[in-house]
Image: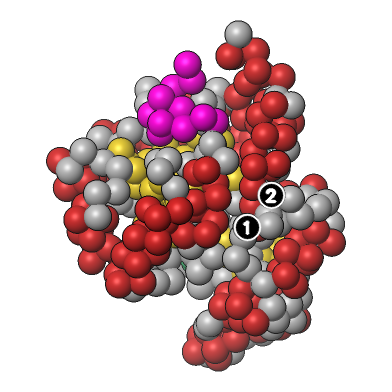
Amino acid sequence: MNIITELLGTKYPVIQGGMANIADHRLASAVSNAGGLGLIGAGGWDVDKVRSEIKLCKELTDKPFGVNIMLMSPHAEKISDMVIEEGIKIITTGAGNPGIYIDKWKNAGIKVIPVVPSVSLAKRVQRVGADAVIVEGTEAGGHVGELTTFTLVPQVVDAISIPVIAAGGIADSRGVDASFMLGASGIQIGTVLLASIECPVHENYKNKIVKSKDTDTVVTGRSTGAPVRVLKNKMSREYLRMTKEKNVPLEEMEKLTLGSLRKAVFDGDMDYGSVMAGQVAGLVKEIRSVKAILDDLFLKSKVYSGELK
Ligand code: TUI
């Protein structure tokens, strides 16, 4: 049996990305029911909203699901206690070092799987008790680190002894095979799930993913310390123009991005919304059910099907 399916209690060794404002009970339950690990993405929501999403998800699936805690969120600490009360069994974290929470979660019997952008953070979280790590390359959508999946995964595999899950740039069975060849035992996917029937983003968002090509993403916010990969549009172009100009106040730049993810997700504003997506968007050609996406990833994977023999 695969070490990740054993850890997660899933059919396939795949975790859904924690996509803030997007990964609600509808997407999480669809992924869990299709054999992956669905996640409620807590980023962007307060503790009451995340609790109610967890309760709704419990009604829609009897399969395991988890919560992704975005550590830059002002609500992260309250959410870190609430997930214990709600009996959540698996937590992934992003956008920071989860060190201060790990003991508490481990004592509650929770499996902890941090997203790491570097070998040094992978080693640190292993030392404080993480059960596995998600190694996310800069190809990914949303908040990203500097290194690519192709270079970072094998370096982390060599540096730690807990299982590694590859993320960033995976949308088909070739990505699954490549991840396994680099030494990962599982994968995390985000962008390909944005183009799923069950994903609750606006239809315009899904169609923009399907229409995008290889060079259509760009990273905003590098200069302000919060690099975020989005699809190019009027907002990202204006933002990058401002970062090149000297003396544009930070508040003016923040005005342009504040609430802009919601604009894309809920209003379908593809001009001024923040349309977070990974570089693999160019490989996503159609909107399919979550089950079709997951079956396609693993049933066509040469390495994974070999592993099962
Ligand atoms: O977290 C993500 N992706 C995200 S979070 C998000 S919401 C947001 N929106 C605007 C600005 C910032 C956040 C949208 N997409 N992926 C996981 C991830 N974690 N990528 C990079 C990291 C990361 C970065 C630094 C993890 C740990 C880290 O540690 C630094 C340290 O303290 O050592």
Report helix, strand or loop for mark 2. Answer: loop
Label 1: element kind = loop
| Residue in view at x 64 percent, y 42 percent | 291
Q: Residue at label 2?
A: 289
Residue 272 image offset from top left, x and y in percent: 69, 83
In the rendered image, residue 6 lying in the magenta stretch gets the answer yes
Q: Dots 1 and 2: beta carbons under 8 Å?
A: yes
Which comes sooner in the sequence, label 1 or label 2? 1
Residue type indicated by callout 1? Glu
Q: Position of residue 199 (x, y in %)?
A: 62, 60
Q: Residues within 10 Å of mark 2 (few under 14, many from 20)?
A: some
Q: Is mark 1 within 8 Å of ligand 1?
A: no
Estimate the x, y position of residue 185 in percent, counting from the top left. 51, 26
Question: In the displayed structure, does residue 92 sit left or right of residue 229?
Answer: left
Give residue 209's position: percent from left, percent from top: 76, 61
Residue 186 visible, this orientation = no
Above or below for 269 versus 118: below
For the residues labelled 1 and 2, the Cα–Cα distance comes to 7 Å
| Residue occupying image coordinates x 47% and y 16% | 1
Q: Amino acid at mark 2?
A: Ser
- Residue 2 in the magenta stretch? The answer is yes
Kindly identify the residue that appears in the image at 52 percent across and 43 percent down.
33
Point out the residue furthest to the top here.
309
Q: Which residue is mark 1?
A: 198
Residue lying at 84% horizontally and 61% vertically, measured from the top left:
211
The region drawn magenta spans 1-12
